[in-house]
Amino acid sequence: MGRLIVANVKMMVRDRQTLFWALIFPLIFVVVFGLFDVGDPDPVDISIIDLAQSPLSKDIQAQLAEIELLDISREFTTAEEARKAVEDGDLEYALIIPQEVAEIGQSQGPSPPVPLTLYFNQANFQINQLIFGVIGQFTDQVNLGLAQAPQRISLSPQAVQDKAVEYFDELVIGLVGMAIMFNSIVVIGVKISGYRQQRILRRILVTPLPLRNYFAAEVLTHLALALVQASIILAVGIFVFGAEIHGNLLWVFVIAAFASIVFLNIGFAIGGRASSPAAASGVANVIAMPMMFFSGTFFPTSSLPSFLPDLVKVLPLTPTIDALRAVAIDGEALWSTWPELAMLAGWIAVSGALASRVFRFN
């Protein structure tokens, strides 16, 4: 077993194309997205809690509802409920209109501005400053309409979470998932197809070597490569481009290894059926490329149209990236990602059965 693993590592190092797909190609994405700021903001969920119930407060709500960037949520009814929802990540923003807004224009002398409290979660990467600017401009417009009133309104943002998460932090974790997917699907698919074309697999059949030992060596070798990939991408992202990881890196490697089994099964199925390495590469990329873009690697799946956000949840890369981000960005424990791990376990069973059924040695 040990000699097989060493032999696999040596062949992998000598195969420059394999090393390119496994290591260099994902790093290109890290560098590109590290140098350029990409992505347009999607509409954000905001709950407006009106404690004043005055004509002015209702007018404020109506005007905010016309801003395309804001998606008004009616789910929450109290200020504390909305603030807790923001803290738990169930809501992106909560704007509280205090009772004092109903008294604007009734006082005789100048008074300090009435603050509209905006609760926000610093984990909402990239767009907080944009939202502050949009609502801040809106309050300025309201104040222009209150030019004759002695009392006006102001915006008072209040964070409900300490850690700040940038877009690139999320992206680096997505690239980890993408890299292990490409390594497992494309690399193993092309490799096995080449072995079949060169009749290496048939020769293995007539040797005393148990087949389970051969496949175990292949799996362990590529699991080790997946961990090396994850380490390199995280190191470049953290030490070169300043990405921050808020959770336990150990859980990242555990999830990466677990998810690799799913993609290795898919790679074995492709390599065991494709007629040539070129055909295996084409099929593998047809499977891997859509997952790379539709599973939230670069952009939130919520930006997809129609029913697609729900459909892409069943892709194996989606629970992989969701679990990786939960432990690395949100700081959750491994066992808290059990829904994603359960989905990956189901994929292991399905993809393993598929690979066993379609795999051919010649």
Image (tube, rainbow, N blue to C red):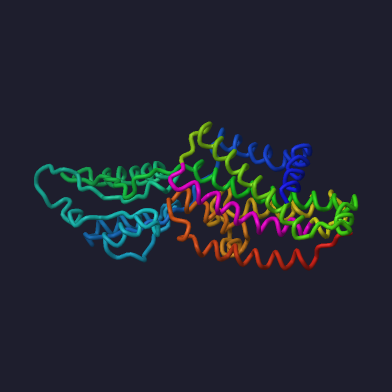
Tell which of 163 and 139 is nearer to you: 163
Residue at the extreme top? 240
Q: Within the image, what quadrant is residue 286 found in?
A: bottom right
Q: Quick check: 202 left or right of 190? A: right
Quadrant of the snapshot with the C terminus: bottom right
- Give the residue at x 15% y 44%: 150
- On the image, the x and y values in percent for residue 357 come to 78, 68
Q: Measuring from the top left, give residue 346's x and y in whole percent.
A: 61, 67
Q: How many marks?
A: 0
Residue at (39, 46) in percent of width and height: 131
Tell me if 71 is positioned left or right of 16 in this view: left
Magenta stretch, residue numbers: 245-270
Q: Look at the magenta stretch and give its main secondary structure.
A: helix
Q: Quadrant of residue 317?
A: bottom right
Percent coordinates x, y for residue 36 in the rendering: 56, 35
Residue 162 is one of the magenta-drawn residues: no
| Residue furthest front in the image | 208
Residue 46, compared with residue 40, is above or below; it is below
Q: Nearer the viewer, residue 49 or 152?
A: 49
Residue 43: give x, y in percent of width and height.
46, 53
Viewer-closest of 156 and 214: 214
131 lies left or right of 115: right
- Please state if 352 lies on the left or on the right of 237 as rendered: right
Q: Residue at x 15, y 54 (%)?
A: 103
Q: Is residue 251 magenta?
A: yes
